[in-house]
Image (spheres, grey):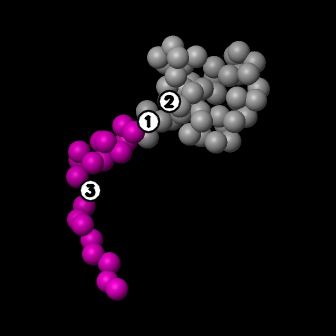
């Protein structure tokens, strides 16, 4: 089986990937800081170990969900 290259990554795809990565990191970091300030140790550990939990929690903090 021979691998086929799709070509170089486009600037739009690069910008989209970078935006998603920065958005996810910012949400995760927001969750970590929020939990540390509020003293929510179990959620802090969960957000630090399982980063999707931290991302969802960080987005929730941004929009005032919790």
Query: In the orientation shown, which residue stands out farthest toward the bottom?
Result: 1
Q: Which residue is mark 1?
A: 22
Residue 18 included in the magenta stretch of the image:
yes
Q: Relative to 4, does residue 8 appear above or below in the rendering?
A: above
Seen in the picture, residue 27 relative to 66 is either above or below; the reply is: below
Write down the residue under mark 2.
Answer: 26
Q: Nearer the viewer, residue 55 or 5?
A: 55
Residue bounds of the magenta highlight: 1-20
Q: Quadrant of residue 44?
A: top right
Element on which disc 2 rests: helix
x, y (%) of residue 47?
Answer: 65, 34
The earlier-in-sequence mark between 3 and 1 is 3
Q: Quadrant of the C terminus?
A: top right
How many angstroms separate mark 3 from mark 2 (CA)?
24 Å
Q: Secondary structure at mark 3?
A: loop
The Cα atoms of the two marked residues, 1 and 2, are separated by 6 Å
Query: Residue 64 location in percent, x, y?
Result: 51, 13
- Mark nearer the N terminus (3 vs 2): 3
| Crowdedness near tag 2: few (<14), some (14–19) or many (≥20) residues, C-alpha within 10 Å | some
User: Looking at the figure, which quarter contains the N terminus?
Assistant: bottom left
User: For the point 52% across and 22% down, which residue is it?
Assistant: 60
Whether the residues at callouts 1 and 2 have beta carbons within 8 Å, the answer is yes
Badge 3 crowding class, 10 Å Cα cut-off, few under 14, some 14 to 19, many 20 or more, is few
Question: Which residue is located at x 69 percent, y 36 percent?
Answer: 46
Q: Which mark is residue 9?
A: 3
């Amino acid at each position: 089986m021979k691998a086929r290259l799709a070509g170089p990554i486009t600037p739009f795809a690069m910008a989209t990937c970078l935006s998603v990565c920065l958005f996810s990191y910012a949400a995760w970091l927001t969750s970590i800081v929020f939990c540390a300030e509020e003293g929510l140790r179990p959620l802090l550990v969960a957000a630090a170990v399982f980063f999707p939990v931290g991302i969802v929690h960080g987005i929730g903090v941004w929009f005032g969900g919790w």
